[in-house]
Image (cartoon, rainbow, N blue to C red):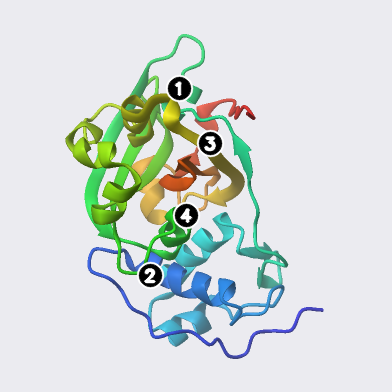
Amino acid sequence: MAAAVTTLRLDPLVVPTGQPLRVAVYSSLAEAIRGGRVELGSLLPNEADLGVALRVSRTVVREALMLLEEDGLIRTRRGIGRFVAEALPQVGLEQLRPLEAIAATGDVAIEVVRTLHELQPTSDFITRGLQLGADDDTWVQENVLKRDDEPVAQMLEVLPAGAVLAERSPELAARLPELQTEGRSLLAAVMDVLGGRLGPAVYDVSVGRAGAERGRTIGLPAKAPVLVLTHNVLLDGKPIYLAKNLITQGFGSLTIAQG
């Protein structure tokens, strides 16, 4: 039986300007897990105890734990609690397609609605996915994908910013205004600029919950089940694009072709 974690060795919670509190809590816990300060397979403290340890509300803790579970870092056992994963997750290589292209099956109208495009500090998910430094900024874009006017996905897409973007892709850095054009995903815009030079793509699909804040953008209650499609895209062997998409039941069949 896995032993309960009685004391978490967490760094003091730091919330960078512009970063949601739930993401800062997620990053703190993820860093502790990946850094070996929390034993793999061990039982986490409950939400209330974590909230006291981090000096945040149970609601914030619950949202952060949901993100950790989506990324395969923890698992919930009904009636027992949340456990750190026995092993850190691995993913595979697939062909690259914008989400709106995957959704465009049959005679349906596809619409990409922009809800956010701004410069933000990095988080653990982004730092590891894009191989960034802790002080690097990122371009974050959020869109809602609609199919016949029904929200079927919430899209979080990220690019490196500043010197990192200029080093990895001078062309993207020089054409940033084009990437902000509304009506398409960030990935579609990046593919238009870089074409066949982009790739390969690394995908992971898991099951999660909508969550309160994200659920509001796609008309779902917080506990509604969703598919979580996470993917990372490389350019010349270095990560250039990262995304986490919440897929609703209205999306239909989700097909990712392997390369």
Q: Looking at the picture, does residue 112 appear above or below residue 52? A: above
Give the secondary structure at mark 4. helix
Counting every numbered tag in the picture gives 4
Q: Where does residue 28 sit, x and y in percent of width and height? A: 45, 75
Q: Is residue 160 visible?
A: no
Q: Going from the N terminus, do you reach mark 4 or mark 3 first?
A: 4
Q: Going from the N terminus, do you reach mark 2 or mark 3 first?
A: 2
Camera-nearest residue between 165 and 253:
165
Identity of the residue drawn at 46% across and 86% down: 53
Q: Residues within 10 Å of mark 1 (few under 14, many from 20)?
A: few
Q: Residues within 10 Å of mark 2 (few under 14, many from 20)?
A: many
Q: Nearer the viewer, mark 4 or mark 3?
A: 3
The residue that label 4 is drawn on is 129
Quadrant containing the N terminus is: bottom right
Q: Where does residue 39 sit, x and y in percent of width and height? A: 67, 79
Disc 2/disc 1 C-alpha distance (Å): 32 Å
Q: Nearer the viewer, mark 3 or mark 1?
A: 3
The residue that label 1 is drawn on is 101
Q: Is residue 116 visible?
A: yes
The residue that label 2 is drawn on is 24
Q: Residues within 10 Å of mark 4 (few under 14, many from 20)?
A: some
Disc 2/disc 4 C-alpha distance (Å): 16 Å
The residue that label 3 is drawn on is 200
Residue 211 is left or right of residue 116, and the answer is: right
Q: Going from the N terminus, do you reach mark 2 or mark 1 first?
A: 2
Q: Nearer the viewer, mark 1 or mark 4?
A: 4
